[in-house]
Amino acid sequence: MSSPKFVVALDQGTTSSRTVIYDHDGQIRTIAQREFKQFYPRSGWVEHDAIEIWESQLATLTEALDPGEISAADIAAIGITNQRETLVMWDRATGEPIGPAIVWQDRRTAEDCARLEADGVGSMVTARTGLRLDPYFTGTKLAWMLREVDGLKSRAAAGEVLMGTVDSWLLWRLTKGAVHATDASNASRTLLFNIESGDWDEDLLALFDVPREMLAEVVDSSGVVGTVAEGLPAAGVPIAGIAGDQQAALFGQGCFSSGMAKNTYGTGCFLLMQTEHERVSSHHNLLTTVAWRLKGQLNYALEGGVFVAGAAVQWARDELGLVKSAEELSELAGSVSDANGAICVPAFTGLGAPHWDPYARGTLMGLTRATNRAHICRAILESIALQSMDLITAMEKDSGIDLQALRVDGGAAASDPLMQVQADLLGCEVARPKSLETTALGAARLAGLGVGFWASQTELQSQTVVDRVFRPAADRDLTRLKRDWIRALDRARGWETPP
C-alpha cells in the first residue's frame, strides 16, 4: 500500500468556504471554493447561517475530491482554518444551530462593552486575555445570546447546548458529534481564555455569565484530534491541524522567529508579528494573542486587525456597482497616480486597531467635480494600505523593531497597485509569495506536522517561494495623503450615536 501523498486544508472564511489540497512540496493540487450569504438584519449586525457554512464547506471538499484521482487513502491529514471570533451555538443532541451565527464583524454588543469598561473590568480582561473589550470578540456575543434567548442559559448549564467558533462547529460536524474541541489560537479570541494559564478562565466565565459545560476542549494546533466520520468525503482521515485564519497565515508564511511579520489582505486586514514564547503587552492599542500551541507550548504574537479591507472592494462591486470584479478595480486604481484628493475610510462596522471605535462609520470625502471612477477605486485601495500603515506603526513602537520587510498574502495582495502603495507608505519592502493561499497552507502544514507528513518547521521554511518584492518609490511624497487620512479618521469617528 502506497503512503499518503496529500494534505487537505479546509479554509472556512467570512464570505466563502474553500478546500485546498497540497502535495508534499507544498504545491496546490486542486482547489474548490463556494461563496455563501451574508445577512445584515440591523445596522451594525452581521450574521451567517451555520448550516450553510457547513454545507458550503462540505461541498468544496466533495468537489476537490470529485475527479476521483484522490482517495481517502491518499490523504495524510486534514487541517481546519476558520474565520475567527464568529459565534456558533448548537443543540448537543440534534446538532442543529441555535439562532444564526454571529459574525466577528457584528457590533451589536458595543453598549455591553462600554458598560463593562465603565465598570472598570477592562484592564483585568486585557491582562488575562491579551484582548480588549470590543464587540469583535466572541465572549460578548455569547453573553448576549444567553441573555436574550429565553431558557438558553439553563439549557447550556445542563450541557444541552454547545458553543464554539467555526472550527469547533466544523470539527463537530466532520466527526458527527464525536469531538467538541478548539485549538488554543481560536480559544484565545473568545475573551474567555487565559493566555498565561492556557485554559478557560473561571473569573471571565463568571464575568460573562457563561456555563463552562458548553465550552470546547482546548487542544494543540497540531496533532490528531479526531477522524472524519463514515459517510462523509475523506472518511477515516485524521483531523490533525486547527488554527484561526490569521494564525494559520502566520504559520503558512513561515514566520516562526520573533520579529517576523505578515499582513493578510482578506475581508479584513490582519497583521501579526511573531514573538515566540514571550508575551509582549501592547501600549499602542494592539492585541496580544496566541499564535499556536505545539506540544503543549504556547507561542504568542502581537496583532492588529482592520475590520474592512477586501470587503471595501466587495462593497464597490456589489453595492455601488462601480466595477464588476476586484481585478477591474485594481486595474482602474492603477490607471491613475493618485486619488485626486479623494479619501475613503471604510469603517462600515467601526474601526479596529489601533483606533477601536465601534461607533465610527464609513466616509468618502474630498470629492470634487473632477473625481472620476478611477480616483474612487484608487481611494478604496489606498484606504486598505493606510489602515495597515497605522497597524504597523503601532507594532513597531510596541516591539521596538523597525520592519525591514513585510510578508503579505490574501486575495487583495494580488493587486500590484495596492502592494506598491503599501511599500511606499511603509518605506520598507513588501514580499508577496508565489501562492497567496497561505491561510490554507498554514492549516495544511499544521496538519501535516501533526501526522509526520512533514518532519519539521525547518523543512517547511525551505518551501516558501517569493513571487515579487515591492520596494518603496524614492521619488514619491505621501505627506498630503497621510495628513488627509488623519483628518478623515477624525470625521469618521463617533458617527453612530451610542444607544
Image (cartoon, rainbow, N blue to C red):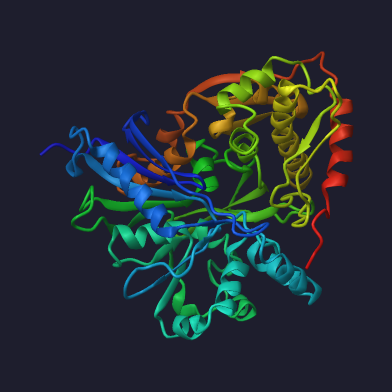
242 lies above or below 475: below
Quadrant of the image containing the N terminus:
top left
Towards the viewer: 284 or 206: 206
Quadrant of the image containing the C terminus:
bottom right
Q: Residue 100, position in %: x, y? A: 49, 63
Would residue 184 be seen by someone viewing this image from the given angle?
yes
Would residue 470 be seen by someone viewing this image from the given angle?
no
The picture quadrant where one finds residue 8 is top left
Towards the viewer: 261 or 266: 266
- Residue at x 56% of width, y 70% of height: 142
Q: Residue 16, position in %: x, y? A: 46, 43
- Residue at x 36% of width, y 36% of height: 32
Tally of numbered tags: 0
Towards the viewer: 277 or 497: 497
Tell me if 62 is positioned left or right of 396 in this view.
Answer: left
Tell me if 308 is positioned left or right of 51 in this view.
Answer: right
Tell me if 415 is positioned left or right of 386 in this view.
Answer: left
402 lies above or below 397: above
The picture quadrant where one finds residue 326 is top right
- Residue at x 57% of width, y 19% of height: 468
